């Protein structure tokens, strides 16, 4: 991620606008992180993650409930079995 001061962003906005299309640009103000500029595509992707639904166990749709009931934990999680006892 590219980091730039707010003053530098103002002076060379076109450059950082171009960079932000392919990677986040972190903008600092007086040495502290103030904001991050991302592409519209990345913003939409992040926004979609933010809008995902969550459910209480009793609210799960039948297809998700069935998937949970019939799924098996991968072998690599066996090291955590002691936490279930």
Image (cartoon, grey):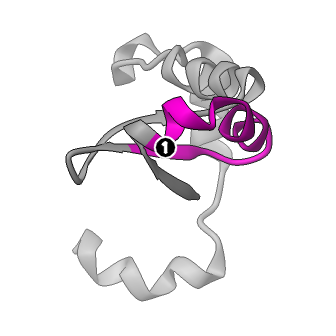
In the figure, is residue 61 to the left or right of 20?
left
Residue beneath disc 1: 8
Q: Is residue 21 left or right of residue 58?
A: right
Q: 31 above or below 69? A: below
Q: Nearer the viewer, residue 5 or 35?
A: 5
**What segment is highlighted magenta in the picture?**
8-27
Against 49, is 20 above or below? below
- Can you say which quadrant of the picture contains the C terminus? bottom left
Residue located 40% across and 38% down the image? 7
The residue shown at (54%, 19%) is 52
Secondary structure category for the residue under label 1: helix
What residue is at 47 percent from the left and 46 percent from the top? Answer: 26
Q: How many marks?
A: 1
Q: On the image, which quarter does residue 75 sit in?
A: bottom right
Q: Position of residue 62 (x, y in %)?
A: 62, 16
Q: Quadrant of the N terminus?
A: bottom right
Q: Position of residue 34 (x, y in %)?
A: 30, 37
Residue at 69%, 38% (x, y): give it.
20
> Is 25 within the magenta?
yes
Q: Relative to residue 42, is residue 54 drawn left or right?
A: left
Q: Is residue 11 above or below residue 49?
A: below
Kindly report the secondary structure that dominates the magenta region of the rendered protein: helix
Residue found at the very far front of the displayed protein:
11
Q: Is residue 74 magenta?
A: no
Q: Position of residue 64 (x, y in %)?
A: 62, 26
Can you give x and y, in whole percent of width and height, for residue 45 in the image? 69, 27
Q: Residues within 10 Å of mark 1 (few under 14, many from 20)?
A: few
């Amino acid at each position: 991620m590219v980091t730039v001061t707010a003053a530098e962003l103002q002076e060379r906005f076109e450059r950082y606008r171009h960079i932000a299309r392919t990677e986040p640009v972190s903008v600092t103000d007086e040495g502290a992180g103030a904001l991050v500029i991302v592409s519209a595509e990345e913003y939409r992707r992040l926004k979609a993650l933010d809008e995902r639904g969550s459910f209480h166990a009793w609210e799960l749709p039948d297809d998700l409930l069935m998937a949970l009931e019939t799924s098996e934990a991968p072998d690599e999680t066996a090291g955590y079995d002691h936490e279930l006892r």
